[in-house]
Structures are given as C-alpha cells and as structure tokens.
Amino acid sequence: MNQPASAYFMEERRDPSETHTLSVLVQNEPGVLARVIGLFSGRGYNIESLTVSETESQKHLSRITIVTTGTPMVIEQIKHQLDRMVPVYRVVDMTLTGRAIEREL
C-alpha cells in the first residue's frame, strides 16, 4: 500500500539557522539606528550583536554591524528589507564575503 503520508505524521522540515554578520552603511543622522532596530524588533528577528561607528573617510556616513541568526530565507529577507530603507546606502553580508573578523569579548 503506497499511500501518501498523512500531514499528521510528516516530519517538519526546517532549514538550519545560521549566524550572519551584516554590514550596513547608513546616513549618519538621528533616528537611523532606531529605524534599523525597529525593523528587527517589528518582525521578530533577533540581534545577537550590534556595533555602530562613524566611517573615517565620509563623516556623513555610519557603519552598523549586526550579527543575527536565521534560516537562509530569513537572512535574505532581512537584507532585502534593510536595503529598501531610505537612509541605507549598502548592505553587505560579511559572512558570505569571508572578510568578517569575529572575536568574543
């Protein structure tokens, strides 16, 4: 008897969560960090680590480095939503480029 498996007995398939480091180049103005954090909290994404600093070469820009965890689909969604924000100039997944420097403090 080759019947299709019942939905009640099927195993739930989940993609494994991965940790990613995102570098977000933003306009250095009041409220930008709150908007970026609001994107994460409003959608239930977790921020493992957060660092913000002004860029040396262009004082009107800041770099926000965010470490977050999620499935590949969730990470892509986060990057897409960050990229659509108005004060955001560029979003780079440092985990994929291999240029991330990680250190536990």
Image (cartoon, rainbow, N blue to C red):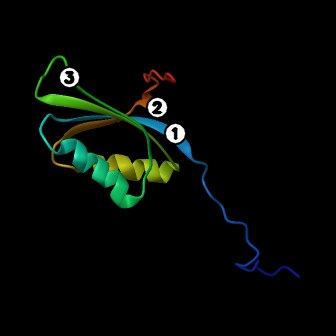
Q: Earlier in the sequence, mark 1 or mark 3?
A: 1
Q: Residue furthest right?
A: 1
Q: Which mark is residue 19?
A: 1
Give the structural element (helix, strand or loop) at label 2: helix
Give the structural element (helix, strand or loop) at label 1: strand
**Residue at the spot of label 3:** 55
Q: Residue furthest top?
A: 56
Disc 2 versus disc 1: distance between alpha carbons?
A: 8 Å
Q: Give left or right: position of 16 versus 7.
A: left
In this view, the mark in front (2 or 3) = 3
Q: Position of residue 44 (x, y in %)?
A: 42, 58
Q: Using the image, determine if residue 31 lies above or below residue 42.
A: above
Q: Give left or right: position of 85 versus 96.
A: left
Q: Amino acid at mark 3?
A: Thr
Give the structural element (helix, strand or loop) at label 3: loop
Disc 1 versus disc 3: distance between alpha carbons?
A: 25 Å
Q: Earlier in the sequence, mark 2 or mark 3?
A: 3
In the picture, which quadrant includes the N terminus?
A: bottom right
At horizontal 30% and vertical 53% (from top left) the residue drawn is: 39
Q: Nearer the viewer, residue 93 or 19?
A: 19
The reply to whether the C-beta atoms of the residues labelled 2 and 1 are less than 8 Å apart is yes
**Residue at the spot of label 2:** 95
